[in-house]
Each structure stands twice: as structure tokens, then as C-alpha cells.
Image (cartoon, rainbow, N blue to C red):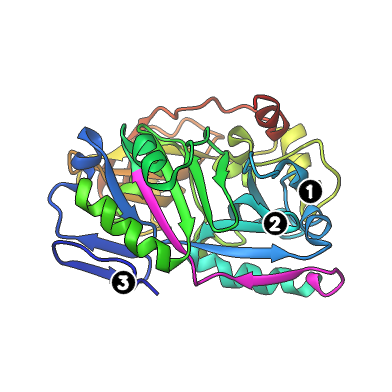
Amino acid sequence: MHDWITAPRGWQCAEDRIVFDTPTPARQALDGTVVTPLVHLGALDVFGPDAEKFLQGQTSAQVGLADGDLAPLTVFCTPKGRMLANAQLLRVTEGHYRLLMQRGLVQPLAEHLGKFAAFYKAQIEVRDDLALIGLIGREAPALAEVRLDLHPPAVWHQAGDADVQLLAHPGPRPRLLICLAPERASSLWIRFAEQIPVVGNGVWCLHDIQAGLAWLTPVHRDALLPQMINWEALGGISFKKGCYTGQEVVARAHFRGQVKRRLMRAQLEGRELPPLGSPVETVDGKAVGEVLAAELDAYDQAEILAVLTTKEDLGPLRVAGQAFKQLKLPYPIERLDPESLAARD
């Protein structure tokens, strides 16, 4: 599955985590430009004459906005509005869409959607034959342009064709995601590794945390409303489209202001990474939230994303015995319509 990955030093890969023998990887990304294999992400393709119509009834995105330029965020929910997966939606070709998401949710989502696809001229395919490469740093756009002959797109947009897609993600440094076949990825990876440091995918996940961007994992599947991870503030929900599964609950929570928990970013006073789902606790041990993501930053301190209650003054908090210091999110908690992102093109 990862045969295209090579490195001048040793490396280890287990499930959705890859680590290279590159010293201070998070610092390398802070000071320069790095490349990483995004082994924690996976792809699901939906294609056929009814692909757009099928997806339109299942997902929060206005599917027509995914036009080969804009590649909007989206989410799939249960009828009760709980998230089954959140993803980035891109159009590969006419009638062919690709969803990028946390790898552990690809197969469950495929099985869920398969229950409805039989009523449409649409097919679903788990794409475990694709390679995903991440570039992070100031020189990332220039490197991508030289190696791929593609002008890097704006954040949440795409460039490329049916064989290679280039996507821009937000973060404290420029970030580009490349999706392509492993055969081509192998030679591209070698060229990148000759120019810039190779780092583990934890660095990419750290930049997700610093961007306030939470990707659902199996730990929190069917547990959270989209607004609990600030998905409407990132343009991941269209409130202007018609019905989709879970739409009524999601819309009611928005228009009635009934979101009781919100995603927050924090730094822990320590370097112990809490497991996903770890409780965020008050000084008297009351659980008021839980951890969705955790990574070590460039200074060897744990940074996390956590969903916390919004209903009370919580006072000092702790996670796994470490003091919790709330950090500012890089975006306002207010509705961002994906239609407005398309209008900026």
C-alpha cells in the first residue's frame, strides 16, 4: 500500500501513523519546507450518470459547487444529524467525484452510502490504490509548480486533471495536498526527498490542529453534530441547498442556536499526548469535553483540539493530568456559506 515511500533514513509505519528518523520534524516545518506521506487519509470515489444527484441528497455540500476549481468541505450525517464522516469533495471529471477523509472512515462510509446508491445510476469505490503527499512550508507552492507544472490553487480549491489533483489546505504555513497514482508518486516523492526534509504525517496533523480543522475519526463517528467541530465556520455546510440526510437537525441547531458544545484549540503543559476521546476535566474531576486530535508542536508541547461544553464558566481545566491552556482559533465562529467561497473565484 505504501510501496512508493522511500527515505534516506529509516522509517516506521503503523496504521495511520508514519515516522521517519528525521530530527525535530515539527521544527523543520516551522523553519523551512517539508514533505510527508499522508497515510492517515483515504479516498472514496462516487461516479456515474447520477453521481451528483445521489451525493446532493446525502451530503451537506452544494455538490454543484465542486466544479473542478472549488473543492468544498462537506459532511455526511445520520438522520439525527450526527456525523458519520467529514470530507473534502473534489470533482475528478464530469460525473466523477472524490471524497478525501480520515482513512478509518472510508470503508464505513462506503457501506453506508451503498445502501442508497442502488437506487441511482451511481457507483462507489474505495480508492486504496492512490497516494497522498503533503507539502508544508513557504516553498511548497513553488516546488509543486515546478514538479507538477500546475499553478497552486487557493485554499479549498483544486488544480490538475483526472490523473493528479493538487489541493490547498489552510494552516500557519502554506500546505498543498497531492493525490495521484503510486507509480507516479514514487518518482515525485524521490525528487521531493532530494530537496527538502522528509517528516512524518504527524506534522501535517499538527498544522490541522493549528488551523482549527478537525477530521472525524472512528472514535467519534455518530457522536457529534457538524457545528460541534465548527464545520459551518469553515464553509462545510450549505444552508441554501435542499434536503439531505440529517439536514433538518443540522439546520435547527444553527437557526435556534442549540449547539451546546464547540471545538476549541489548546496547548497542554506537558508533552504527553492524550489518546483520542480523553476527557477534558475541571479541577474537581468533572468531564466537560473530550479530545479529538493531539500532536506535539515544534517546542515539544502537546497541542490539541477538543470539543467542550459552552454552557458554563469552566475554570481551570486538565487533560491527562496536564494543565489546559486555551488558544485562539484562526477563524471566527460564525457561518461561512460555501457559495461565498465559490463567488470569490
Q: Which residue is mark 1?
A: 247
Q: CA distance from mark 2 to mark 1?
A: 8 Å
Indicate whether 131 appears above or below 302: below
Q: Is the C-beta separation of discs 3 and 2 under 8 Å?
A: no
Q: Secondary structure at mark 1?
A: helix
Q: Which residue is mark 2?
A: 77
Secondary structure under the numbered disc 2 in the rendered image? strand
Q: Give the Cα separation between the discs numbered 3 and 2.
A: 29 Å
Q: Residue at x 73, y 64 (%)?
A: 47
Q: Is residue 120 magenta?
A: yes
Q: Is residue 169 magenta?
A: no
**Left-right relation of 70 to 319:** right
Q: Is residue 203 left or right of residue 28?
A: right
Q: Nearer the viewer, residue 185 or 213?
A: 185
- Classify 10 Å Cα crowding around label 1: few (below 14), some (14-19), many (20 and above): many
Do the residues under discs 2 and 1 have CB atoms within 8 angstroms? yes
**Residue at which label 3 appears:** 14
* N-terminal-most mark, 2 or 1: 2
Q: Specify which label sits upstream in the sequence, 1 or 3.
A: 3
**Type of the residue with mark 2:** Cys
Query: Which of the 4 image quarters holds residue 115?
Result: bottom right
* Disc 2 packing (10 Å; few <14; some 14–19; many ≥20): many
**Kind of residue at badge 1:** Gln
- Residue at point 74%, 56% (across, down): 80
Q: Amino acid at mark 3?
A: Ala
